Amino acid sequence: MRSELDDVYRRVYREPPYLEGEDDVARFGVLFAEHAALPGFAMTTVREAGTIGGFAYGVRREAGWWPGRATAPAPSWLDGEELFYVYELALVPELRGRGLGRALLDDLLKERPERFAVLASRVEAPARRLYHRWGWRKVGAFDSGGIDLLALALS
C-alpha cells in the first residue's frame, strides 16, 4: 500500500503550486511512517479500478498542541482542546470533480471524538476554495508564508 500512497502523493504534488520532486516524495514516506505510528492515527482511501487514487489521513493531537511553525498561538477557543490534525488529503487529477475529495475528508472526520479538526493549506492551492466552501476557516499561518492553518468544528 505504501508504494500506492507514494504514487498518489507524487502525482498530486508534482503539479503547481507545489512542484514537488522525488526528494519530497521520500520525505512524505518518512513522515507518513512517523504519523502512522502515533496514537490516534486514522486514514481513509478511495480506489479506482483496484488502485488507490486518493487518501486522507490525520492524527489526534492532545490539548495544547499547536504546530511549531505557526506564527502565533492557537486561538483561545481552540486552546485546551484536543484536535484532529489532517496531515494529507490527496486525490489524483482524473478523480477530481466527482465529490471524492469531500467524501474522503468526511469519512476521515466522521465520528471523531475531538470537537475540532485543523489542517494546513497553501493559499494558492485549488483545494483552498473547497475547504472554505466546506466550512473550514483560517485560524493561523505558518512562518514559511503562503500556508494557512484552517479549522473546522466537528460537533
Image (tube, helix red, strand yellow):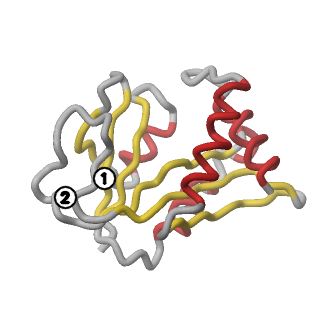
Q: Is residue 3 above or below residue 146?
A: below
Q: Position of residue 150 (x, y in %)?
A: 32, 46
Expressed as whole percent of the image width and height from the top left, the position of residue 21 reads: 69, 22
Q: Quadrant of the C terminus?
A: bottom left
Mark 2 and mark 1 in contact? Answer it, CB < 8 Å.
yes
As drawn, is 136 to the left or to the right of 49? Answer: left
Query: Is residue 118 left or right of 71 when viewed as pictured?
Result: right
Question: How many C-alpha atoms fall within 10 Å of the one at disc 2: few (<14), some, or many (≥20)?
Answer: many
Q: Amino acid at mark 1?
A: Ala
Task: Indicate whether 12 appears above or below 56.
Answer: above
**Residue shown at 67% from the left, 43% from the top:** 29
In-front residue for pair 97/37: 37
Residue at image position (63%, 64%) is 44
Mark 2 lies on a secondary structure that is loop
Cα–Cα gap, marks 2 and 1: 9 Å
Callout 2 amino acid:
Leu
Name the N-terminal-most of marks 2 and 1.
2
Q: Which SS class for mark 1?
A: strand
> With respect to residue 116, does 73 lie above or below?
above
79 sits left or right of 12 in the view? left
Query: What percent of the width, then of the height, locates residue 54?
Result: 69, 51
How many numbered marks have been drawn onto this rendered protein structure? 2
Q: Residue beneath label 2, please?
A: 78
Residue 102 tag number: none
- Which is in the foreground here, disc 2 or disc 1? 2
**The N terminus, quarter of image:** bottom right
Instruction: Give me the residue at 52% from left, 60% from top.
Output: 105
Of residues 82 and 13, which is closer to you in this image?
82
Which residue is under mark 1?
Answer: 151
Identify the image quadrant of residue 146: top left
